[in-house]
Image: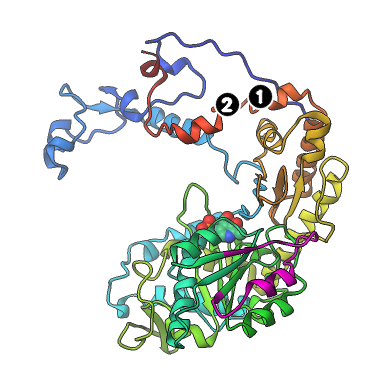
Amino acid sequence: MMTKPHAAPVLRTPTAGVSLMVIPHEVPLVVEEARPGQTGTWQGPADERLAASRIPAALRWNPGTDGDFGLSEPQTVAHFTKLSQKNFGNDTALYPLGSCTMKHNPKACDEMGTLSSVNLVHPSQDPRTLQGSLEIFWELERWLAEITGMDAVSLQPAAGAHGEFLGLLVMRAYHEARGEGHRDEIVLPDTAHGTNPATASMAGYKVVEIPSGPDGLVDLNALKAAVGPKTAGFMLTNPNTVGIFEKNIQTIQKIIHEAGGLLYYDGANLNAITGQARPGDMGFDIVHINLHKTFAVPHGGGGPGAGPIGVKKRLEPFLPVPRIVKRTAGDFTTEGMERHPQSVGKIKAGYGQGAALVRAYSYMCMLGGDGITRAAEIACLNASYVKERLKGILDFPHPGRSMHEFVASASGLKKRTGITAGDVGKRLLDYGLHAPTVYFPLLVPEAIMFEPTESATKDELDRFIAAVQAIAAEDPALVHAAPHTTPVKRLDEATAAKKLVLRWHTLARLEA
Ligand SMILES: Cc1ncc(COP(=O)(O)O)c(C=O)c1O
């Protein structure tokens, strides 16, 4: 049974100057906690250490002159433990953030990514001294090509959006090489993730948005009307952003290809179909793969992620350099612009995010082909289970069968109780669960987008369902003011966005 979290604990407002250590959740900076004589290790006098430092004197923090200055070991451990407890990660509990695929990141893969043989090599080393890394990267390219149905892969991009950008640079280079550089329009469905139009604009394209049909799928007539001699490509994810498989994908690819455009696959939703269906077989020409989603590389807080792209044969000459080449078994080398003169150049230093690539490689080794296929099946099963159980509380604007995620609407709930999608998301935090994605995609009013991934157990799914049911029956005033139990309470979001506070100030200093 779900225990109802308490409403806000009443905290005394601290008086100016009172030690911050008594205020729950406040964790001062290390430099604020440090005191003379507090140290767990003896490293020599502070002034000698500073003198040996290469940091220019003007930029050094001067910890004081009388003796050693710092934190003892228990204080250090307490400091970082407290900080870690302020956070909610997918090691804490269910993190069903739709479109983000926040699955469990096995610790064994982290271990592989931090091996010294991976981390203590440099991409500028002579390739003869990088054979192990090159072999891993080369194999990873092959596996990703196999999973997506593409012919060649570049591991360089550092995120999905970065992959999109590279994909569109490759697209432009392809059209230009064919004397069709005048193609300057990218067509997108109105369900597209914000990075798609943003990337298209950054790459210098005009964005043409088409509406989706009432079933949430691409409106074929709108697509036909939108494409023409100026179309460079169409960006789509499948299953699409409302979690439904674009069953007309063969017709879509025909429309785009007949117009002379290319079909771009946004791989954010690949987790629904790994081992089941391949974008390359659906007619996509370019795909990006978010390794930090589908292949269990930790993400959030801005990375580091990895967003390799895969392309069909005719686009391979335009991939970035260096390309990794296998000469014979166990003999790898790299090739630059001289061997690939049509390449778009480099998109990132080295070969990509090395440690992230090794994590994804390890994950794929652990699961094997069968495991990767099974993961997609369970991801879809988990989402379908929650969707069925939430019927009657939330609305489901698209009748079709959802795959690994679904989009519900809190419109009816709002009408009945005043509780909005945002309120549900915030209140879930009080139940110890991360909020799903809310207000995306934009075309669904009061959207709640839920993606449990294959990592969630049935107990966790039941806990989530019980929490949503409980919230829908709670006093709306309590829900409007949530979260009540987190270090940061409900913010005025407009003020938070417009008046960014990016520097740490202790409460005492703020109040002074
Ligand atoms: C559908 C979709 N496309 C693209 C992206 C961008 O990927 P990244 O965050 O790796 O840049 C996301 C991210 O959530 C997404 O959900």
Asked if ligand 1 lies within 8 A of label 2, the reply is no
* Quadrant (top left, top right, bottom left, bottom right) of the C terminus: top left
> On the image, which quarter does residue 432 sit in?
top right
For the residue carrying disc 2, how many other residues have a C-alpha within 10 Å: few (<14), some (14-19), or many (20+)?
A: few
Where ligand 1 lies, by image quadrant?
bottom right
What's the CA distance linking mark 1 and mark 2?
A: 8 Å
Q: Which mark is residue 461?
A: none
> On the image, which quarter does residue 192 sit in?
bottom right
Which residue is at 47% across, 84% downward? 180
**Which is in the foreground here, disc 1 or disc 2?**
1
Q: Which residue, given by chain and number where applicable, does mark 1 sit on?
A: 481
Task: Give percent across and percent down for residue 56.
Answer: 13, 41
Q: Residue furthest bottom?
A: 328
Task: Give the residues in magenta.
Answer: 208-232
Q: Secondary structure at mark 2?
A: loop
Q: Which mark is residue 489?
A: 2
Q: How many marks?
A: 2
Camera sees residue 306: no
Q: Identify whether 19 is placed above or below 104.
A: above
Amino acid type at circle 2 is Lys
**Left or right: 102, with 377 as reference point:** left
Are the two marked residues, 1 and 2, in contact with CB atoms closer than 8 angstroms? yes
Camera sees residue 107: yes
Amino acid type at circle 1 is Ala
